[in-house]
Image: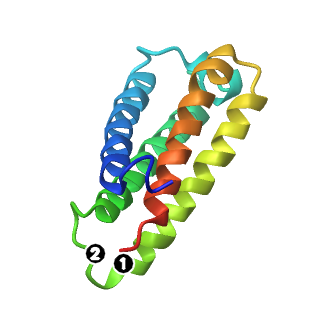
Amino acid sequence: MKRLISANLAGNVLLAFMGLLVIFHMLVILRVVPADIIWGGQIESTSNEFIILEVVSLLLTLAFGIIIAAKTGYIKTGKFGKIVNIGMWVIFVYFILNMIGNLASGVAAENWLFAPITLMLAFLALRLAMEKS
């Protein structure tokens, strides 16, 4: 896999997607993007649960971005290098589980748009997780 894509490129692409995800979640919270294309179409945009889930998603995306930036070398890890390495494996597993959830969803956007994107992100996260720090 190391010959297919460099760790640096994988990290940069992941960071770009994390930035896009932050924007996406902000647009969902602001109700610019319809809520029925996320969370399997099960959450109404008028509920408190919707806001809580989207804020958690936004914070998780930001945390993933920090871990990816640290693994890519943009943030110095110091004593926390091992935690960053574990975090990258957690991100990889998260993307795999998220992709399975997207495929199990009854929402076409999640099946045909988000699942392939999440598969690509999982591949990139795996590549970065495999990189020695």
Three-letter residue code for mark 1: Gly
- Count of marks, rendered view: 2
Q: Residue 49, image x and y in percent?
A: 60, 36
Residue for point 36% across, 56% down: 7
In the depicted structure, whether residue 27 falls above or below residue 62: above
Marks 2 and 1 sit apart, C-alpha to C-alpha, by: 5 Å
Residue for point 45% across, 47% down: 4
Dot 2 alpha-carbon crowd within 10 angstroms: few under 14, some 14 to 19, many 20 or more: some
In the depicted structure, whether residue 34 falls above or below residue 63: above
Label 1 SS: helix
Label 2 SS: loop
Residue for point 21% across, 60% down: 74
Q: Mark 2–mark 1 contact, CB under 8 Å?
A: yes
Residue 98, quarter of picture? top right
Q: Which residue is mark 1?
A: 81
Check the picture and name the quadrant holding the C terminus: bottom left
Dot 1 alpha-carbon crowd within 10 angstroms: few under 14, some 14 to 19, many 20 or more: some
Q: Residue 64, image x and y in percent?
A: 42, 54
In the depicted structure, whether residue 87 falls above or below residue 109: below
Q: Which residue is mark 2?
A: 77
Residue for point 59% across, 46% down: 95
Q: Residue 71, image x and y in percent?
A: 34, 64
Q: Is residue 113 left or right of residue 9?
A: right
